[in-house]
Amino acid sequence: MKFGNYMILDFPSKSTNEAFARSAVACFASQMDPTLEELGDIRTAVSEAVTNCIVHAYPEALGNITLRCRILKDNILDIVIKDKGVGIPDVEQAKRPAFTTGGADRSGMGFTIMESFMTDVEITSKPGKGTTVHMRRKLLRRQ
Amino acid sequence: MHFTSFLENNRLTVALTGEIDHHYAKSYIQAIAAKIEAYTPEFCILDFSEVTFVDSSGIAVVINALRAMTQIEGHLILSGINQQPMRVFRASGIDKLVEIKEAVS
């Protein structure tokens, strides 16, 4: 039974782990028989959340990122990505399209993409304590 | 990161490859800027046909190339974009800022 299956990953905030994290989630999600488009959306959203941890949560030194995936009933993929970094002082401002505290190599579109590609996105953050991104994507059952 | 580029009739084509995320974005941004600065082409074509994945870092690559081309009063064209990168470009609205061609001419 796929419902109830889960996995937990723990890795340092090295940028090489962006590709690792999205690939690992895609492998886990493949048991839900997703379409290529659904898989692409999930990989993108995970990449955004993990990149935020690497760029913003731990700007000076490496820190720990925890990623948890669960399969919920009704074919819902539940993803939690958690860091213990600097936190976000104003989550609403951070979610605004094109807002970034990163440099010219950042677009400020990370949260916009997470929100357009996932069914639900919830961000909780405490300055100095860390940030948790909780995302869900309902996968359509194919006939 | 791996890319090839060529100049023909004042058109600079830069063919990107693989997955463009934050890990690779900065190198791509710098490499494309250096090519544009060196050749000051009238058109810069970013060929995405060998790109299998982009996230918002890929948007930053396009925006930086657009900025560099606008500065020299040139034009930026994106070509050969696969399904996943296209969804990211649409979600960000970048498809309304830059000319997009389906295939490499």
Image (tube, rainbow, N blue to C red):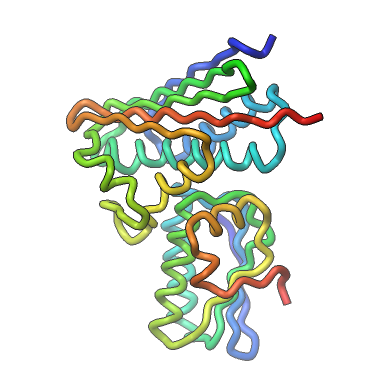
Q: Position of residue B47 (x, y in %)?
A: 63, 67
Q: Is residue B14 visible?
A: no
Is residue B18 toward the left or the right of residue A143 in the image?
left
Q: Is residue B95 above or below residue B36?
A: above
Which quadrant holds residue A49? top left
Q: Is residue B24 above or below residue A121?
A: below
Residue at the spot 33% in from the left edge and 61% down from the top edge: A104
Specify the quadrant that holds the C terminus of chain A.
top right
Q: Position of residue B17 (x, y in %)?
A: 62, 57
Specify the quadrant that holds the N terminus of chain A.
top right
Which quadrant holds residue A84? top left
Q: Position of residue A63 (x, y in %)?
A: 31, 29
Q: Is residue A117 above or below residue A72?
A: below
Q: Position of residue B26 (x, y in %)?
A: 41, 57
Is residue A19 toward the left or the right of residue A66 in the image?
right
Q: Is residue B10 visible?
A: yes
Q: How many marks?
A: 0
**Furthest residue toward bottom:** B9
Q: Nearer the viewer, residue A6 or B90?
A: B90
Residue at the spot 37% in from the left edge and 58% down from the top edge: A105
Residue at the spot 41% in from the left edge and 52% down from the top edge: A109
**Furthest residue toward right:** A143
Residue at the spot 43% in from the left edge and 34% down from the top edge: A121
